[in-house]
Structures are given as structure tokens and as C-alpha cells.
Amino acid sequence: MHLPLALQPAAGSGSQDVLAVANNPVLWTCVAGVFGVIIIQSVIFLKAARRAAPAVDLSPAEIRTSFRSGAVSAIGPSLAVSLVAVALLGLFGAPAVLSRIGLIGSAAYDVSAAGIAAGSMGAKLGDASYTQSVFAVAFFAMSIGGAMWMLATLILTPVLRRGDAKIRAINPMAMAIVPAAALIGAFACLGLSELPKSGIHVLAFLVSAAVMGLCLLLARMLRKSWLREWGLGFAILGALGAAYLAAGPAVGL
Amino acid sequence: MTYTTTAPASGGTAMADFNRTTSRWGQITMIAGLLISVAGPLYLAFASGLDIAPAQLWVAFAAVAATFGIIWIVEPLTYYPVLGPAAMYQAFMIGNISNKLLPAALIAQTNIGAKPGSKRAELAAVIAICGAAAVHLVSLAVFVGLLGSWLISAIPSSLLLVIRLYVLPAVLGAVLVQAIVSMKQPRTTVIALVVSAVVVFGLVPLAPSLTMVSTAITVLGTILLAWFFRAKTAAPGAPVHIE
């Protein structure tokens, strides 16, 4: 007897209380570990830069200016990322969101990876088939994706530092078309796959796309680049607001 | 800023020392970050009492690799000339590169009048990314870790249900528009939309077992068709990243 996941009794690893496992203390420890590694790396790099600075005519005042410029210019984007991260807390829990969307990865890739992973188990994120096991596999898929990016960086950086001609000899046309085709194809397929689920999914998708389009258009017309940074956050809020109004009666509001 | 042929010699021993330190510690910290970030989900899958077979993880990995495998390699390649070797180890661990770290580095270089591609510019970029990382860690800890977690526990469960059900289309609609606009390839966009529509509304309803590989099929199909129907005069070089 094989019931579809959605009809199985909620028990054991079939439990739908995803946030219970998502907030496991071990995962919080890993988040603290990633934060710690980034802090240690920043301190080591800062010290190394300060040691090398006199040799290239970089004064202590200019070091302070560089650090402050970097910090100030990161305030807006960091808050924009935080808004997106908060919207995803209910789906993935704080540890996964902090380590995946906040750091290392980004909302677009990690939400996609999670959706693909859930699909590989015949489940969908957020609905009745989204069990603790599905969350664990989705979280693994997001993390291994980020790990592959780091692995590629670890392998390619020393190669590129040597100025290896072979890599730069890759056909520039292929370098332009293939990645763009992969990205747009992936996001288009994932996005359209949301549409058959329900009318409210269609509404949320369209509102989100419209808000983002509007933000990008206004950013270009008014030359306000912060609109580009905040576009995803605004789009999610707008789409969830529309879904909330439309779904109100169904969820007993 | 171009670092494609960085040779440590010209900056003297101080820059050689900087390159050695950032390269060694960049690798050590990145390997540590890599291991810690994979340890969490592996613990969850195998040691926390959930019943997950290794095969399920492999299938999920294969599905994600089929979709993003190319991007894993292409992104570091396209960022290297802009970031330089040292900042590569920072950027790919901290994330959110194009919308946060690159602007931070550029503004710092402008503010101290560093010529792009110079050693001064390289150091300023590394220092600026340290500043950006500090702000980012604090805002994540405060707004997501503390305030966000409180918010999730405080909002009514009906609202949480709506978020869980519909946050996926709410993210993907915007992400698709962002990808289309930032890639600036109308031809590829049309092909991608047609292929994904055929797969999602044609192929998957006919053969539901293909659902789990639908993204991979779309990606492969889009790449092949976009290459086959490429414009003969396409200007290459639009950077490949959206965040």
C-alpha cells in the first residue's frame, strides 16, 4: 500500500511540523559557526590589508574611509536581504534562512534549489506534502549547492591567479548565452510550475512579477538604484498581501 | 578593475605577503565554511531521527546540479576579473555579491580615488568588503535572528499559513522578471518561456513522472535551442548573476 505523501498520517518523519526540526539546536550551532568563520576571515584579511597598505600608498585614514564606505553602502542592501529572509522564515526556519539566504547563497538560488529538491521527492514546499523529511532534503540541496559554489571558487581562483589562458579561451559567445539560458530557463520553469497549483498561486506570481517589473522600471527612470535592491522584498510583500486578501475566507480570517 | 594577469612581483614583498596570507587563509576559512554549512543538513538527515535514505539526497543533488551546475562554474569565472583573488574568498562565502559587495567595493575605491585595477584598489575592495560583512552580519543577527524569529512566533497562525503556502510564487515571479531584465537577452528569454511552458503545461500533465526532472529538461532544452538560434551578431559579455 502506497499512499501519496499528502495523505499519509502526520507522524514521525512524516510530521509536518517543519519548524520543529528547522530550529534544531545543532543547526543554530552551525549558523554560529558560519558567522564565526566569516568574522575570523574578515579580521585576518583586514590585518593583512593593513600590513600591505604602506607599500601601496594607502594611508590609515584611507583604510578607515574604505571600511566605512563599505559598511555604509551595505546598510540598504543588508536590510533588503533581511526583509526577504524574514518572509522565508515561516518556510525554512531561522537557521536555514540565516545561513542560506542571508549568507553564502541568495534567495533566488536557494528557494529554487529547495523547490527542485522537494519536487525530486514528489512533494511541494509549503503545502501538506511538506514534511520534516522533505525539509531536511531541501535544506541539504540548498547547502550542497552553496558548497559547490565554494568548491568552484576554491579550485578556480588559484588557476585564474596563474592567468591560465585555457579558461579565458572559452568561447565568449558560449559564456554569454549558455548561463543566461540556464538561469532564465530554470526560473521560468520553476515559476510556471507554481501556476497550476491554484488561482491564488497565479495571483501571487503575477503580483510579484508586476511589482518587481515596476521597481526595475522606476529604478531606471528615476535613477534610484535602491529600488533595484528592494525590488524582491517589495514584490514578496505585495504578492503575500494579495494572497492574504484573496485567501482570507479559506483560512478562516 | 582587471586582475586577469596578477603577478605578485610589482607590489613588492608587502603585496606578496598579502597575497600569500589571503590565499592561504581564504582557502582555510572557505573550506571551514563549506564543511560547517553542509554539516547541519547532514546531521538533520542522518542523526536526528528522520528516516531519509542517502539515495534521496543524491537524487536531490542531481536535480539541483542539472539545473545550476553550469552556474556554479561560470559565476566564479565572471566575477574573478572584477573581484581579484583575495576578495573571491570573501565574496563567495558572504554571498549577495552583485547587489551588495560589488557596490561596497566600488564606492570605497571612488572615495579614496583608487585607480581601478591598481594594488590600492585591490586593498580598498578587500577592506570595504570587510566593512560590508560587519554590517551584514549585525543586521542579519538583529533583524532576522532576533526580530524575525519573534515576529514568526507573534503573528497569527492563519497569516503564517498564507506565507508558507504562497511565498514560493511570491519569490519566483520577481526572480524571473529580475533574471530576464538583468540578462538582457530577448531571444533567449522567449525561447526559455516557450520551452518551460511546453514542459510545464504540455509534457508534465502527459507524463507526471517527469515532474522531478522538469527543470533539468527545461534548462537543457533552453540551452540547446538558444545556442542553435543564437543571433550571429550577439554582443557577449553581459555578466551572469542575479541575486
Image: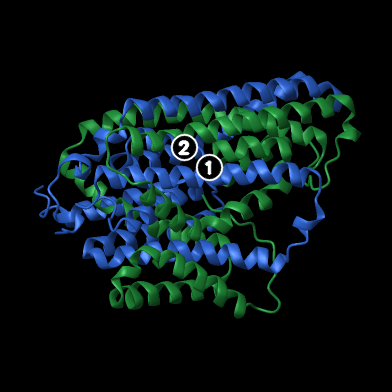
Q: Is residue A136 above or below residue B131?
A: below
Q: Quadrant of the N terminus of chain B?
A: top right
Q: Secondary structure at mark 1?
A: helix
The reply to whether the C-beta atoms of the residues labelled 1 and 2 are less than 8 Å apart is yes
Looking at the picture, tell me which residue is in the foreground, B56 or B117. Answer: B56
**Colour in which chain B is drawn:** green
Residue A147: mark in rendering: 1
Quadrant of res B240: bottom right
Based on the displayed image, in which of its 4 quarters is residue B184 positioned?
bottom right
Using the image as rendered, state which of residue A236 and residue A226 is in the foreground: A236
Q: Residue at x 36, y 51 (%)?
A: B56
**Of B46 and A22, which appears nearest the observer?**
B46
* Residue A22, position as x, y percentages in the image: 31, 35
User: Is there one chain holding both mark 1 and mark 2?
Assistant: no
**Where does residue A114 sit, x and y in percent of width and height?**
38, 50
User: Which residue sits at x=63%, y=55%?
Assistant: B74
Horizontal arrangement in the rendering, residue B202 relative to residue B239 (left or right): left
Name the amino acid type tagged 2: Val
Give the residue at x 73% y 48%.
B81
What is the three-letter code of the residue carrying label 1?
Ala
Which numbered disc covers residue A49? Answer: none
Is residue B193 in sight in this rendering? Answer: yes
Residue B111 image-quadrant placement: top right
Percent across and percent down for residue B191 are: 50, 76
Q: Which mark is residue B38?
A: 2
Horizontal relation, residue A197 to residue B181: left or right = left
